[in-house]
Amino acid sequence: MVDFERSDGTTRQIRQEKGLWRLTSILTKVLAFLPDFVARLKIRRDSGPLDSLDRVTAFVSTRAAFVAQKTLYSYLKARMGTRYPSMFEDDVLISSVNIAKMHIYTACLSDLSVHAAIRVLHDESVDDSAYRALAMLCFRRGLDDNEEQALNIGVEAFSIHEALDEFERRLAFQDWHSGLPAPELFTASPAALFRWAPIAPQLKRDDKEILQNSIRYTWREARMQFEKRIDGAAVAADLNRFLAAGN
């Protein structure tokens, strides 16, 4: 009887330890996503004027991250339904999400960097090199802010150098004076969301229009906030000082 009780108690303890290990493992993975949540809270508190290069590049970096995360996680949650919490138990899926998140973020960063440069400088007399410089400053700030995440997923999954090369190609062919409405500039992010979301291709095909419209809709709020807060003259002056200093 004593041996039976001892054995039964040991079995319960093992089960409790396994349950605790499983919970700890899940919490560890959930905590990996907390920086995204903290970033969203920080965005809500940030409402000052965008009147310097530092403020504009920070806005582009954080808003691109917010749009990428919101649209990707919303789509995964909608597609996975009640299975969504189990995502945090699947190491392979988490790895796929992190890879997708970085690629989608870079595309969002590309779109918003171009938009910010056009909105700040919007003047026929401004040389194209100034537009390219401002857009690249925004893009590099975003990559610098997320360098640790990029390195964590490995260069075989995401290359900072390749991202920079691709953005430079975009800048080389960008028409800075086309007068296109803002939504028409946001082309990279909808394509990246469709391509990189870790959902079976046959399912994504059915969702393509809804998926791409969702990110276009999410961009509206970011553009409204940028328009409300931007001091283009102050940022342009700061950019001129920066370039005059030989940077």
Image: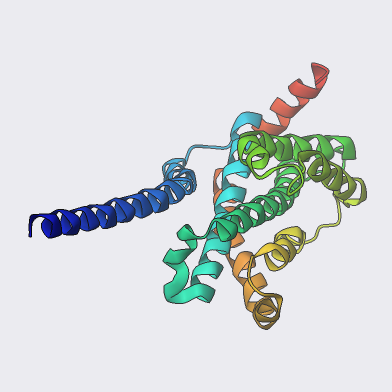
The extreme right residue here reads 173
Residue in the picture at 66% in, 31% down: 53
**Residue 77 shown left or right of residue 151 in the figure:** left
Comparing 49 with 145, the one in front is: 145
* Residue 115 visible at all: yes
Comparing 15 with 67, the one in front is: 15
Residue 119 screen position, x and y as percent = 71, 47
Colour theme: rainbow
- Residue 136, placed above or below residue 79: above
Residue in the picture at 73% in, 66% down: 195
The extreme bottom residue here reads 206
Comparing 151 with 62, the one in front is: 151
Asked which quadrant contains residue 184, the reply is: bottom right
Residue 112 screen position, x and y as percent = 69, 50
Instruction: State which quarter of the image contains the C terminus.
Output: top right
Residue in the picture at 63% in, 40% down: 152
**Residue 131 shown left or right of residue 51 in the figure:** right
Instruction: State which quarter of the image contains the N terminus.
Output: bottom left
Residue 30 screen position, x and y as percent = 43, 51
Count of picture labels:
0
The extreme left residue here reads 1
Residue in the picture at 58% in, 37% down: 50
**Residue 139 shown left or right of residue 174 in the figure:** left
- Residue 86, placed above or below residue 46: below
* Residue 52 visible at all: no
**Residue 24 shown left or right of residue 169 in the figure:** left
Residue 137 screen position, x and y as percent = 74, 34
